[in-house]
Image (tube, rainbow, N blue to C red):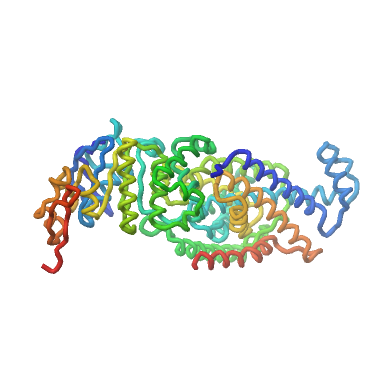
Amino acid sequence: MRALTLRRLLLQCSILVVILFVVVVIALKFGAVPVSLYALGRDLLRLILGQSSQISSDYGLIVMNIRLPRILLGIIVGASLAVAGTSFQALLRNPLADPYVLGVSMGASLGSILALIAEPHLSISPALAALLTPLGAFLGAGATIAAVYFLGRREGQIDSATLLLGGVIISSFLSAIIMFLMNTLSGNLRGLSFWLMGDLSTPLQKSAYWFLGIGFLLAAGAIYTTAADLNLLLSGEKEAMHLGVDVPRVRLVVYVAASLLTGLAVSVSGAIGYVGLIVPHAIRFIFGSDHRTLLPTAALGGAIALVFADTLARTIVAPTEVSVGAVTAVVGAPLFIYLLRRRLS
Amino acid sequence: MSVEQVSYAYSANPAQAPLFTLEATSFQAGPGEIVAILGPNASGKSTLLKLIAGALAPLSGRILLNGFVTHSLTPRTRAQRIAVVQQESPLLFPARAWEFVLQGRHSHRPSLRFESEDDVIIAKNALSQVGAADLSDRWMDQISGGEKQRVILARALAQQPLLLLLDEPTLHLDIAAQIGLLDALRRLAAENRYTVVVVTHELNLAAEYADQVVLMQRGRCLRVGPPVSIYQRELLEQVFQTPLSVDLGSSGRPRVTVLSGT
């Protein structure tokens, strides 16, 4: 018997932080414009010391003003999707659950688009208007997961196959509406592929990174307070209740927070799939399935995976780029099939 | 533990007549006592067990455990006092037996705290109390049905409850595993002063192990008492709709023999 300790959790996290650092350095170095490690180190140091005005070379500016914010976005979005996926898997008792597979990301995309369409017609201050897209994404995500949940529930039990099928159908229905909206309403909305596949190339204002970061910490923190309850929910809702879990409260907290995470991620990066599916599985395989360690390690793993996938997306066909959503789907979909087959056998 | 005039009604929709009703039921059980709830299918056994567990709120009446109404306790407090052993749903991700037993400590610790040394010791003791200390490091999906039922019982013991509820614990077990489990249960009830309530279809095992029997039929509690007073041929034949004979077994407890083809 070796019970879980805080020390073990911190050890696991520090290993992943080191890996994340390495991946970030790789992501800063590689791209359409190569940069030497020396120049990279020098410019990073200047940035940390607050002497960003001394970053002189064009290359340095590219790295610090374009690549670094994009990596930051990848970290937040990857962590959000991985935590959302982990939560959905525990709550729905389905190891194949993922915000994209369940259609939740599409719901968030549609919510964002509707918010963007509505925005010019509402007379609200620019600060509030900036919040409209993430709010729309959150509501879209929340409504979709509620719909999928009710579709998948039969006689008080969640039926795994119906749930996934429901998610797939809802997803294709929502993407059809997105295509319809995009084709009929031309305007300065971001492109169709962004909402259906997702990428990290859109630069954001500085305040948006703070908004995303704080939103992530609040929502992921709320989910983490239920980590021990989620462990018990894996044995079923009834068992969990008899072991002392306030099931309705946990369900509500995790649904709202996971929808929020999905909504935040999708409102800035579109629907990037499979990160929420692959990462929790990989982390479970390495560190075990206790949510008290799984949630933070999956968050770090999601950050690593998405930053790495985005580096691939930027470099494999340089100087053009592919959507990072295409990269994650190419890796994720076969893995999904593998997990599905293993589960059926 | 005392069940006082408890009734319940299931209905798909409040406007319609209930699909199933449990009529006012009362009985008491003290520490160290084993109560068996018997009755044919759909007689209300499991409903009664859910009411006692606090999972359902009674329509009228109340269930007291040490003076507290069970269903108005928070899930956490309830789990510190009442442990439920039921047919287990399969685990989503593999777990080892000791991890599974540690789940019983959930309600005793703040939710963000990791398991303490004490929790680990309590879980270990629970496993050895059911004779499953050697299973500790085995995976839950790789042990036999009898072994699994013991580990599930150990998890309930780790809750350190006052009241232990079991829903058909001997289902799917071979006879040796059944006796092993029930012997362990009797010993534990005596040692730890648990009140044990078991729902079962096994008439002879109930007669052998129960101090008190609650006989149910179609949502009604027909009779409560020690096995000798309940195990009467006419009564059991009428309740179970099966010809049978009752005599005294070599243990001095009643024994039921089913008469087929008569």
x and y, in percent, of residue A186 in the image: 65, 62
> Would residue B186 appear left or right of A298 to someone viewing this image?
left
Image quadrant where residue A6 sits = top right
Is A25 or B36 nearer to us in this picture? B36
Is A206 or B51 nearer to us in this picture? B51
Residue in the image at 52% along x and 38% along y? B115
x and y, in percent, of residue B169 in the image: 32, 52
Is B222 or A53 nearer to us in this picture? B222
x and y, in percent, of residue A311 in the image: 75, 57
> Would residue B20 appear left or right of B231 to someone viewing this image?
right
Residue in the image at 66% along x and 58% along y? A189
x and y, in percent, of residue A176 in the image: 56, 66
Taking the view exactly as shown, the residue that stands out farthest to the front is: B250
> Would residue A47 appear left or right of B177 to someone viewing this image?
right
Image quadrant where residue B160 sits = top left
Residue in the image at 34% along x and 45% along y? B184
* Observer able to see residue A121: no
Taking the view exactly as shown, the residue that stands out farthest to the top is: B67
Q: How many marks?
A: 0
* Observer able to see residue B227: yes
> Would residue B67 appear left or right of B222 to someone viewing this image?
right
Rendered position, B237 above or below B127 = below
Image quadrant where residue A224 sits = top right
Is B178 or B104 nearer to us in this picture? B178
